[in-house]
Each structure stands twice: as C-alpha cells, then as structure tokens.
Amino acid sequence: MKRNILLVVLALLIGFGTYAQEGKTKQQKKQEKKEKALQEWNDLKKFIEKKDYVFTGSLFDGQAVDPKINFIYVKDKHATIQFANGFGGGPNGIGGITVDGEITAYSMMAKKEGKAIVVQFTVNPKLGQGVRGPINVNLRIYSYESAHAGLNGSTGLMEGEIREKAKSKIFTGNKLN
C-alpha cells in the first residue's frame, strides 16, 4: 500500500514538473516568435530603404488577380507599374497597361518598430505611354505577406505581398515607349 502511494506521489511530482516546463517553453516559443517577427520586419525595412522591391497584387477591389502580372516594381529611382487581366489585348499585350517612370518625392515612414511601414512616392511616366500626369503610389506594408497599394488616391485598393526583386516572379508586358 505504501508502495502504491509512493508511486502515485512520484507520478504526480513528475507530471507537475513536466507541466511547469511546458509553461516555460510556451513562453520561450512566444518570445522566439516575437524576435523572429521583429527580425523579418527589420529585413523588410532594409530592402524598402534600399529601393529594390516588388509589390505583387493578388486582390484588386476584392477580385482575385494574377500577382505575376499585377505589380509595382521599384528599383532605385525608377518604377514599373503594371495592371493586367491576362486575357491578352490592351496596350501591353496581356490585357492591361505597363507604365515605366522616374520616382520623385519618395518617403518611407515607420511610426513604431514592428508596425506598418508606409511608403509614398510619385511616378512620372515616360512620354507616350498613354498615361497623363504623375501617378501617386501609397503602400502600407504590414509584413511580407500583407501589403496594400493605392494609386492616385482612388478608392481602388490592391492587396498582396512585397518581396525583394531577387525573390519575386513577375512578367512584364510590352511597354508603349
């Protein structure tokens, strides 16, 4: 009898010890997850500051679009903006328009570390591309997988991802110029 009681007490102590360790590992896992998210945010901020990235849109006003042909590509002082439906036709040959231009008034803001990064810039299209006037771009970037783009303050909103150019796959249609 004493032996059975001793075994039960020993089993309970081992169980409580395991429970205490699990609580600690959950906290450690939470901390590791937080550190990883902060590191990803810092990496994201670095390549946005470097101006070598691609925003690929997968939803436009709630409608699914092909991210390989709907994008905003920023490289140094130049940008390519392309929207297409993929059915062919249109000025770019894939059902939409492709605009190249020079970036002016580029600004990036991050109010708090780990929170949304807001990038605003203006693209002055090259002459002859069928677009009049500058294009104002507003990007809100939450993480690699969560970014939003608005053009010229319109109500149209594109949701998608942001990646370094080297890690993205895009297809550029014909340019008018």
Image: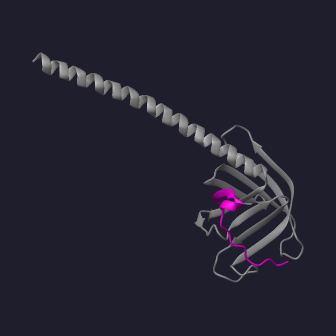
- Residue 47 location in percent, x, y? 74, 51
Residue reaching furthest front? 3
Q: Is residue 6 something that shows in the picture?
A: yes
Position of residue 152 in the picture relative to residue 33 (left or right): right
**Residue drawn at (70%, 51%), measured in percent from left and top?**
140
Pick the residue in front: 174 or 154: 174
Can residue 60 be seen in this snapshot?
no
Report the colour scheme.
Answer: one colour
Tally of numbered discs: 0
Q: Is residue 172 magenta?
A: yes
What residue sits 82% from the left and 78% below the top?
A: 176
Q: Residue 160 placed where, x, y %?
A: 63, 59
Q: Spot the residue most to the left.
A: 1
Q: Quadrant of the N terminus?
A: top left
| Residue placed furthest toward the top | 2
Q: Nearer the viewer, residue 175 or 84?
A: 175
The quadrant of the picture occupied by the C terminus is: bottom right
State the extent of the magenta-drawn residues as a range: 159-177
Name the foreground residue: 130 vs 116. 116
Q: Residue at x 82, y 69 (%)?
A: 100
**Magenta segment: does it hold 33?**
no
Q: Is residue 36 above or below residue 172?
A: above
Residue 112 x/y as whole percent? 70, 37
Residue 11 x/y as whole percent: 24, 25
Instruction: Name, please, the residue furthest toward the right.
Output: 127
Report the residue at 90% width, 73% height from top.
127
Determine whether 158 is above or below 100 in the image.
above
When the figure is inspected, residue 121 is found, relative to residue 24, above or below; the finding is: below
